[in-house]
Image (tube, helix red, strand yellow):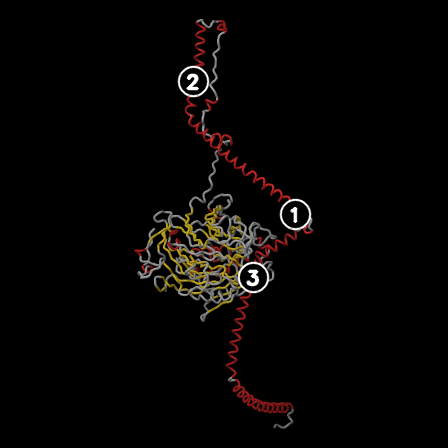
Amino acid sequence: MRITLDPSSDPTPQPKRSPLSLTPKDELEWVPLPKHPLFSTSRAAAPSSASARNLLAWDGACRLYFWDHHANSLHRLSLRLGDPDPTSVLASSPSKVLQADVEPGFDVERISINKNGTAMLLLGSNRLSVMYLYGRASKKDVNLICRTIAVGPETYSSRSNNIRVLQALWHPYSDTHLGILSSDSVFRIFNLAVDPLLPEQEYYLQPVEPGRSRNASSVCPVDFSFGGEHLWDRFSVFISFSDGAIFVLCPVVPFGSLFKCESLLEIYNDAHTFGLKSTNSLAASNSKLAISWLEATFPELQNQEAEGDNHSLLRANAYAIFDASLVFQGPLRRVGQGQNEDSFGHSVECEGRAVSFLYNLASKDSILVTAWSGGQLQIDALADEIQPLWTVGSPPRLRVDSRDQILGLAMICEPAAIDRLERLDHGAWLGNPPPLLRLAIVDLALPRRAESGYSISLFSDTLMTERIYSLHDGGIDSIVLHFLPFTCQTNGKDDTMRTPSVHPVLNTCQSGCTSEPSLCGFLSLSDSFGYSWIVAVTLSQECVVLEMKTWDLLLPVSIDTEKKPIQAEGESKEREKPTIISKELLSGPKEVLVPQAAPSLRSVASDSIEGRSTLHQYFKLFHETYVEYAHKVYLELKHHAPQLNKIINDQHSRLGDAQQKLLKVEEKESLLQKRIERVTQMHHSLEERLRRLRNLPCANKKPLSRAERQFKSELDHFRAVELDALHSSVDALNERLRRHMQASTNASRQQQRIAGKKVGAGKDQMSMLKSSLEKLTLVNTENSKKVKLVESTLKSKEKSSRDPSLPLL
C-alpha cells in the first residue's frame, strides 16, 4: 500500500529544524513504528494519573496521532500497513508537529478523533478542548498552529473542580457533535459547528426516585457508550452507574446528523407492523409516539415510503415532543431473575465498583461489557430489542429562535413505573426495558490491591468484532467471544454456550506487582487484507507493536478421538536410557532342543559308527548355539567398550563431586547444628509468649456473629464504593449551588442597576403625580356633583310618572 502525502503537509525547508519536525518529501524516511525517533529517544516518564490515559488516536486510514505531554503538542505520523512485509507497520520520519493556537491549560489524559479525521478531542479530568487538524491553520516555523476551542467552558472549568468529565465521545453519525457525561449526572450533546459554549441537548438523569436510593453509588454515573448500527440501537445511549446498573436513553439524535434511509425504513415499518396494529392499547400508543417522532425528525421518510424515492441518507431535523420527556429505561435486568434479586442483576463474583463500560455490536448481537475495580469483566448480551419510550405529561424545556426553530432542549429523564404483571409480559412496544443474557464473568486474575482498585479501560477490535481488549495496570488482555446467541441462531448453528477465551497480550507486571499504570496509549490497527495489530506506548514513551491473529481464533477446537496407549512411567524412563547391550544378548542363548534318541542308542558304544554320528550331530548343534552366542557377546562388548568406559568415567566424576559436596556438608554441619539450637530456643520462647498471650483477658474474644459480619461487610463496601460516590454527589450539589447563587447575584445586581437609574427621575415624577392627583380629585368631585344632580332629576321624573295629578316641572 502506497501513501502519498498532500503538498500542503510538506513546508519549505527552514534554517533551523527540530529532529521531530517536518521535512520535504525527499527527506522522509519510512522506519518501523517501534524504532521511530519519536518513540526511540529516551524521555522522562509521564506523570501517573488515577484515571486511565490514552494519548494515541487513529483516523481509520493511514494517520496515527500521539499527544506529547512534554511539549503539549500533537504528532501526526503517516503509516504503511503491510508494506513491504504483510505483517510490518512502517511510519514516516520525521513526524508532523501540530500545536494549539491556545494552550489547553490542563493535563491531557485522553485524545479522540472524529469520524472524518478533521478534529481532535483533548480531554482532561474537568476540562476539554477540540483542536481542528485542517482548515484554518497557519504555519509558524516548521510546525502547524491549529485552531483550538474550549467546549462548555462555563460548565466544565478548572476554577471549580466539583464537576468532573467522566467520558466524552464523538457521535458515530455526526462529525461535529460531541457527547459528554459529567459527574453531576447530566448527559450533554454539544454541536461544535453551531455553538461550542452552550449544549444542544441536556438530559438530567434520575435513575431512582428522590428519597428512595439505598446507596450513593446508584446515582453516580461512570461511563457511557453510543449504540451501533442495529435497529433502535443507533438512536440509543447506554449509561453505566457505579453499582453496575445499566440504563438506556432512546431516542437521542443530534440535530443535523445523517442516517441511512434503508435502516430508518426498517424500524418505521417495524413500528407499523408490530406496534400500531397491535391489539394492546399500550403497545399501540407507544408505537404511535415513535412513528410521529420518526415522521417529524425525518420528513422525507413518508415520501420515501409512498413514492419510493431513492435517498441514501436522511438528515435529522431539530424536533422534540412538546408534552413528553424520554424515559430513563432501566436498570436492565438479567433473564430469569426473580423479583427479590437486585434489579440490575449484580453478580457476586464482581468485586468493588464499576469503572468502565463498553457497547460492542458483534454481527446481530449487542454486547454490553462492564469492568469492575476488582479486576472482573461482566459480559452480557441484549436478549430483546430496544424501543423508544416517552413519559407523557412531562414537557421538556426548549430554546428557540425568532422563527420558532428549536436550538436546544433540556429534560429530566426518570424510569417509568412498571407493574409486575406488565414486567412479566415481554411483548413488543409495551415499554419494558430489554433484559440481559449473561454470557460470562471473566476474572483477569490481577493481584489484589488494598486501595481503591484497578482502573480498567475497554476497547473493541477494529477488524474482529468478537474480540475485546482490556487495558489495566498489569498490561493488556484479549477476550474473544465464541458464543453469540442471535448470531449463532441466525446462522443455523447449534453450538453450545462456550466460554470466552482470555489471552494475555502484554504483561507489564514486575514480579507480580501492579502498583502504578505503565501504559499511556493503546489502539487497534487493521488493513483491508485481514491483518490486525495493536500499538501500545509506555509512560517512558516506548512503542510496542504486536500482530494479532484473526482467522483461526473462532474455529472450534479439534479433539483427536483416537486413543493412544498410555505408557507407564517406568517404560518411558527405560526408553530414554541408551541401550548398551541388546536385550537379545541379555536374555542368554536360545534353548537347545535335543532331538529325541531311540531307546536302542543308549546301548550303542561311543566309538561305534552310530555313536560317533550321534555325538557329531550333538556337537554341531551345541556349537551353533553357544559358540555363536559367545561370538556375538564378544563383538557387542568390543563395540560398546568406549561407551562403557565413558560411562564409568562419568560415574567416577559424579562420585567425586558427591564426595566434595559431602565434605562441604560436613563442614557446615556445625553451623547447621548451631542454627538449629537457636531456632529451638526461639521456638521455646515463642511458645512461652503465646502461652502468656493466651492468658490475657482480650484473648477470649468471641468471633463476630452473622449480623456483625454482615454489618462489617456493609461498612467495608461503604468505605470502598459509597464514600467516593457521596463525595462526587456533594461536589455536584456544591457546583449547582454555586451556579444558582451566581445567577441570583447577577439578577439582584441587574435589578439594583435598574433601580439606581430611576432614582434621579423619581422626584420630578412624584411632583407631577401629585399635581395630576389633585386635578383628578377636582374632576372627580365635579363629576360626583353632576351625578347627584342627574340622579335627583331622574327620581323626580319617576315620581311624576307615578302620580299624574302632580304638575310637571
Instruction: Find the distance from the CA under tag 1 to the CA under tag 3.
Output: 46 Å
Q: Nearer the viewer, residue 152 or 297?
A: 152
Amino acid type, residue under disc 1 in the picture: Arg
Residue 309, position as x, y percentages in the image: 40, 58
Looking at the image, residue 221 lies above or below residue 651:
below
Residue at the spot of label 1: 689
Q: Nearer the viewer, residue 645 or 578?
A: 645
Residue position for label 2: 628
Hey, which quadrant is residue 795 in on the image? bottom right
Q: Report whether residue 181 is seen.
A: yes
Tell us which disc is closer to us: 3 or 2: 2
Within 10 Å of the Cα at label 1, are there few (<14), some (14-19), or many (20+) other Cα atoms? few
Spatial separation of the CA atoms under disc 2 and disc 1: 81 Å
Mark 2 lies on a secondary structure that is helix
Rounded to the nearest angstrom, the CA distance separating label 3 from label 2 is 98 Å
Single out the mark in the foreground, 1 or 3. 1
User: As shown in the figure, which amino acid type bears the numbered disc 3?
Assistant: His
Mark 2 vs mark 1: in front: 1
Give the labeled residue for mark 3: 727
Is residue 442 visible in the rendered image? The answer is no
Sequence order check: which comes first, mark 3 or mark 2?
2
Picture coordinates of residue 340, whole percent (x, y): 61, 52
Label 2 neighbour load within 10 Å: few <14, some 14-19, many 20+ = few
| Mark 1 or mark 3, earlier in chain | 1
Q: Is 348 placed left or right of 7 in the picture?
A: right
